[in-house]
Image (tube, rainbow, N blue to C red):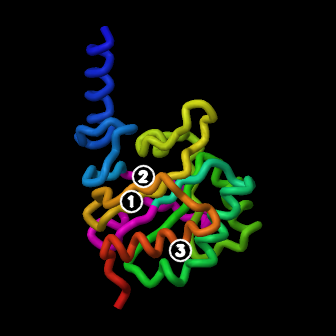
């Protein structure tokens, strides 16, 4: 019975993720990143497919708006935005909060250089395997996605005070081209 359920889940996930034979919790470097289309704190909807062939994408998940670590992380992204913007990359933080909550959060922090994405249905968070089963929030994980839509790196050890500079350092390490 367990094997049958596992097979059915694999088929279902394969269908949901456009044929990719990937279990959400098993995403790894080299896998096709699940597409997303999420409303940002800037009022726009941002989709992974919009950047395909144009820019790398950083998607930094955090647990909850207006909490200590998440505030530090998002402030760090804003403070280090010049270092990140040197690279040909679109970058976002994301949570399972509502768009309204994330907009208020972004405004409280003065975030203007990037959008905080909202995934209140948790569909995208589940596709990325970041939903913490005990708490229901997203784990603090950062995904680096190449222009081809493939995952280049996954960072699960985030220093909230230095998250922005960590991202800039990782982009350099991954040889993401600088803007010309």
In the image, 91 versus 132, the foreground residue is 132
* CB under 8 Å between discs 2 and 1: yes
x, y percent for residue 1: 31, 8
Quadrant containing the C terminus is bottom left
Question: Image height check: is 134 above or below 149?
Answer: above
Q: Which residue is mark 1?
A: 48
Q: Which residue is mark 3?
A: 165
Q: Is residue 96 left or right of residue 18?
A: right
Q: Which residue is mark 2?
A: 36
Magenta stretch holds residue 43: yes
Kindly identify the residue that appears in the image at 53 percent across and 53 percent down. Answer: 61
Q: Secondary structure at mark 3?
A: helix
Question: Image height check: is 84 above or below 101?
Answer: below
In the image, 131 versus 169, the foreground residue is 169
The alpha-carbon separation of the residues under discs 2 and 3 comes to 25 Å
On the image, which quarter does residue 71 sit in? bottom right
Kindly identify the residue that appears in the image at 44 percent across and 64 percent down. Answer: 58
Kindly identify the residue that appears in the image at 31 percent across and 60 percent down. Answer: 152
x, y percent for residue 119: 55, 47
Which stretch did the figure color magenta?
35-58
The alpha-carbon separation of the residues under discs 1 and 3 comes to 23 Å
């Amino acid at each position: 019975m367990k094997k049958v359920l596992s097979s059915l889940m694999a088929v279902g996930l394969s269908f949901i993720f456009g044929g990719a034979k990937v279990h959400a919790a098993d995403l790894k470097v080299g896998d096709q990143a699940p597409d997303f289309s999420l409303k940002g704190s800037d009022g726009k909807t941002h989709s992974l497919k919009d950047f395909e062939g144009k820019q790398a994408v950083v998607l930094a998940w955090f647990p909850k708006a207006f909490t200590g670590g998440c505030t530090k992380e998002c402030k760090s992204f804003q403070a280090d935005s010049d270092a990140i913007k040197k690279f040909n990359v679109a970058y976002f933080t994301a949570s399972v909060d509502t768009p309204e909550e994330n907009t208020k959060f972004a405004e409280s922090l003065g975030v203007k250089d990037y959008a905080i994405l909202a995934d209140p249905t948790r569909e995208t968070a589940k596709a990325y395997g970041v939903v913490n089963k005990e708490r229901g929030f997203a784990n603090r994980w950062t995904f680096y996605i190449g222009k081809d839509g493939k995952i280049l790196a996954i960072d699960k050890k985030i220093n909230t005070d230095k998250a922005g500079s960590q991202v800039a350092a990782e982009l350099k390490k991954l040889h993401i081209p600088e803007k010309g």
